[in-house]
Amino acid sequence: TGAGFILERSGNEWVSTDALTPPTVLFGDHIGVSASVEEGWAAFGASDDDTNGSSSGAVHIYKQSGLGNWVFHSTMYSPNPHASARFGNALEISRSDLGLTMVVGSLFEQEGTTNSVGAGHIFVLDELNDQWNSTQRLLPEFLTTSALYGKDVSIDHNTIAVGAPSLRDSDVGPSVWTGGVQSRPIIRPVRSPNHHPSRTKPMGFPQWLGQRHRAFGRDCFLGHKPCRWRPLRLRKQQS
């Protein structure tokens, strides 16, 4: 089933809440596979939730109502739900210029007839109505089967990084999204300084670029090594 925990600092110690389990959680949902907390909101991924098909995935949201007290708020599902998508495998919350923003990975999501491309989904909090709304779906520029786009995600203010550790050839690495959600910028992936297109490794090998990363300011830590990403050329999606 799984569970989520919040730890809050009291004096010099971090004090944990009791296990947080939403009312709809079932055996095998694996709640807590991902977790993020920001400004009194907490989110926990349950990538094997079966509500919209086997392992379609879900994100369970809690809201703080006092020190050590977190109340279940709602459950979010993918705007493009289907079996085995594993929505919620990765997530993070941060405040952007649009408001409190959550990015959620869905690493086996299908796009058209291409299987397991993966996707990222952006949700923005409507603070007046206390509601999280889906605002944009993120996809890699090149749709590749089993790319695992969304294996890991990170957001820092107005920059989002999305890992795709199984993209091959010249497309290896994460993409970076910047700016508003009215038009989707298409961005060429960042590649490792040591990238060799001819090298292949088993899918999910832990040293693949994009397996784990974090965006922070103008630095993006990719895979197992930190590297500096250079300015990227943006191209807006054609309307």
Image (cartoon, grey):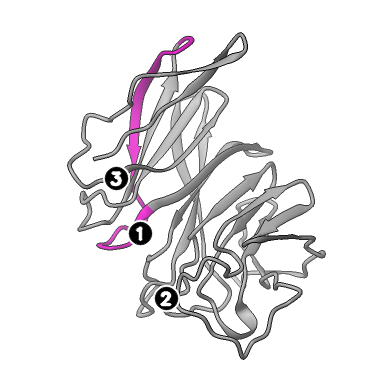
Q: In the image, is 122 to the left or to the right of 75?
A: right
In the picture as drawn, the residue positioned furthest to the front comes out as 12
Find residue 214 and report its horizontal and vertical position in percent: 64, 50
Q: Main secondary structure of the magenta part?
A: loop
- Point out residue 117 in the picture as x, y percentages from the top left corner: 43, 72
In space, the residues marked 2 and 3 are separated at their CA atoms by 22 Å
Quarter in which the N terminus is drawn = top left
Disc on the earlier residue, 1 or 2: 1
Residue occupying image coordinates x 52% and y 26%: 127
Query: Where 65 falls versus 159 (above or below)?
Result: above
Q: Secondary structure at mark 1?
A: loop
The answer to which image quadrant residue 228 occupies is bottom right
Relative horizontal placement of residue 183, taking residue 64 as reference (left or right): right
Residue with the mark numbered 1: 80
Which residue, as the protein is rendered here, is positioned at the far left?
27
Q: Given the image, on which type of amino acid does mark 1 rest?
A: Asn
Q: In the structure shown, which secondary structural element does the residue marked by tag 2 occupy?
A: loop
The image shows residue 128 at horizontal and vertical percentages of: 51, 23
Residue 12 higher or lower than 194, as above or below: above
Specify few, some or many for label 1: CA neighbours under 10 Å numbering under 14, 14-19, or 20 or more: some
Residue at position x 78%, y 62% from top? 229
Disc 3 crowd, CA 10 A, few/some/many (<14, 14-19, 20+): many
Residue 86 within the magenta-colored segment of the rendering? yes
Number of marks: 3
Please name the residue that numbered disc 2 is placed on.
Answer: 146
Magenta residues, as a range? Answer: 66-87
Pair 1/3: label in front:
3
Amino acid type for the residue under numbered disc 2: Ser
Query: How many other residues sit within 10 Å of disc 2, few (<14), some (14-19) or many (≥20)?
Result: many
Going from the N terminus, do you reach mark 2 or mark 3 first? 3
- The residue positioned 22% from the left and 29% from the top of the image is 23
The front one of 78 and 133 is 78
